[in-house]
Image (cartoon, rainbow, N blue to C red):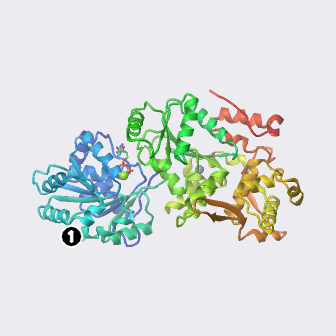
Amino acid sequence: SSSSKSSGPDSVMSEQNLKLYDGTDFPWSKDIEQHLKDSFHLSKFRLLQLRAINLTMSGKDLFLVMPTGRGKSLCYQLPAVCSKGFTLVITPLVSLMEDQMMYLKSINVSAVLMNASSSKEHTKTVMAGMTDMKAPFKLVYVTPEKIAKSKLLMSRLEKAYNACLLSRIAVDEVHCCNYKLLGILKRQFPKVPLLGLTATATSSVLKDCEKILCVPQPITITASFNRTNLYYEVVRIKDSDSNVSLSDIASLITSRYKDQSGIVYVFSQKDAELVSAELQKRDIHAYPYHANMNPEDKSRIHRKWASNKIKVVVATVAFGMGIDKFDVRFVIHHTISKSIENYYQESGRRDDNPADCIVYFAFSDIFRISTMVVMENVGQQKLLQMVDYCQNVDRCRRSLMAVHFDEVWDDKGCNQMCDNCRYAKDYSNVDITQHARQVVQIVELASSMDEKLTPLKLVETWMGKGPAKRRKMIQTTTLSRLEAETVIVQLLLQGYLSEDFSFTPYTTYFYMKLGRKASFLKNQSHTLRMKMRTKETGTAKCFFVSSLYYMSDPKVKTVVNNLQSTSAVKANDDKIDITFE
Ligand code: ADP
Ligand code: MG
Ligand code: ZN
């Protein structure tokens, strides 16, 4: 599933030559193998770990690009233990640093850290240790700022370098731009191999890193971001129905994920409290986890979570970073992420065993998040890509993600591990031109009356919920709420509608206006089609019903399909409660 690629035409090493570094007959191989088992208590390497370790042990400068959770740290921690002197590790996040210290302590690998809050004494001890021939520690963790600002540290490193005690430099999260001042490292210590690690680098970012860090022609190895063990699914829910998603999530957790642990990501701290309370009401061991909790509660939940006493953590995405636990079997997004990159990271923080990534997609989430990211540089664009990921039933979810990592993943490589591949035959191509014209007419009318239309108001007006006077002036729709919302989202994604923000000092409002393509619809020959989930008979009446239920289980699918063919369900696609064991 994973593959490696060299960094480009100017890269010095071909894939064939890189393969030589997968071997186990290097002078250090026995030592590495032994420490893998005895110190790190791991039985074997994951893909590309050994190659990275052999390259850095050979003294090469290396950029290692691997998805989060795949095990980049081992690629410098293990070499550190097997080398003379110490490895300097530069990490931007103090919390991650502390996590690593805890971990290394637990496996008896000596490591120290220095950051802005280190005491004078501590700093003194660490500095002294750097030139101690007995090498009292194998790893020294520092922040980038420390390197940039502390002359004392630089002169100590210089001494260690001259005494051949600075064995390696690892720069974690190398894509972070605040590393501008780190060019000094390679200039001052040209003989020390540098290892840059990241999970989010595209080739252009990596080129920048090379320049900033002054590493000439590093070798780049990239693990594919395609996580073949993960099943991706999107569940469309109706806006008014946050309850549906909650009971749906709850029944998934108690049936399909019985006795397994997972994460539910939510939009806000308030949602974290709310959703975990709702899940608790349904007898699920769920606890909120967000930045605003007091430290004792946090560490209590962290501990219980780590020891599997808590089944589900309901976390805000901003705080998800701190909940590294790799045996989670499901990650459910109660609200969509703000970008595909974010979604990939949030859903991917786990081991290589099979697991599900499900996102609940509701119309109003788009606008909630939109007003939040409106000030970010490409915030809107990234959000709409995420919306497109959720809305699209035409292509493999994996291939929709891959483009964001400069990769191409073959649909065939999915192995039906996404809903779009698995249920492809349940979708059909629908003409939505007439619907589009109706929507555009409403938006035009509003604008001619100088009226601002929120997305919610647009749907409701289209569905005939507005004042009677208004209803006479427009064509209302026969589509269900969910279908109507889907069409509007499609029009937004395709540029027939666009967003219109208005700002007050306290809030940002989101309105709908005509997009650059709206006028195309005036042309009678212009048609607009989209792929939608339909039921087998092809009437687009209640095609979303099935998506409300988790259908990996063929038995459930049959039940749902049978239900769909009954008129009771056709007449009311609002709610069906099916429980299944
Ligand atoms: P990354 O930095 O790439 O996000 P980490 O280095 O934090 O990932 O490692 C993630 C998890 O994977 C850790 O719990 C680590 O112990 C585990 N891990 C790393 N290498 C292996 C391996 N070869 N076998 C099993 N688990 C591993
Ligand atoms: Mg890491
Ligand atoms: Zn697929």
Position of 262 relative to 163 (above/below): above
Residue 514 drawn at (x, y percent): 73, 67
Query: What amino acid is at disc 1?
Result: Gln
Quadrant in the picture for residue 54: bottom left
Residue 338 image-quadrant placement: bottom right
Q: Is residue 422 visible?
A: yes
Task: Name the side, left or right, on which 22 lies relative to 9.
Answer: left
Q: Is residue 139 left or right of residue 228?
A: left
Decide which of 450, 103 is in the foreground and name it. Answer: 450
Give the residue at x 10% y 54%: 132
Measured as percent of width and height from the top left, residue 479 is found at 80, 50
Between 242 and 484, the one lying in front of the other is 242
- Residue 106 locus on image (x, y percent): 26, 39
- Residue at point 63%, 48% (across, down): 361
Q: Is residue 343 left or right of residue 142?
A: right
Query: Label 1 belongs to which residue?
Result: 188
Q: Position of residue 42 (x, y in %)?
A: 31, 40
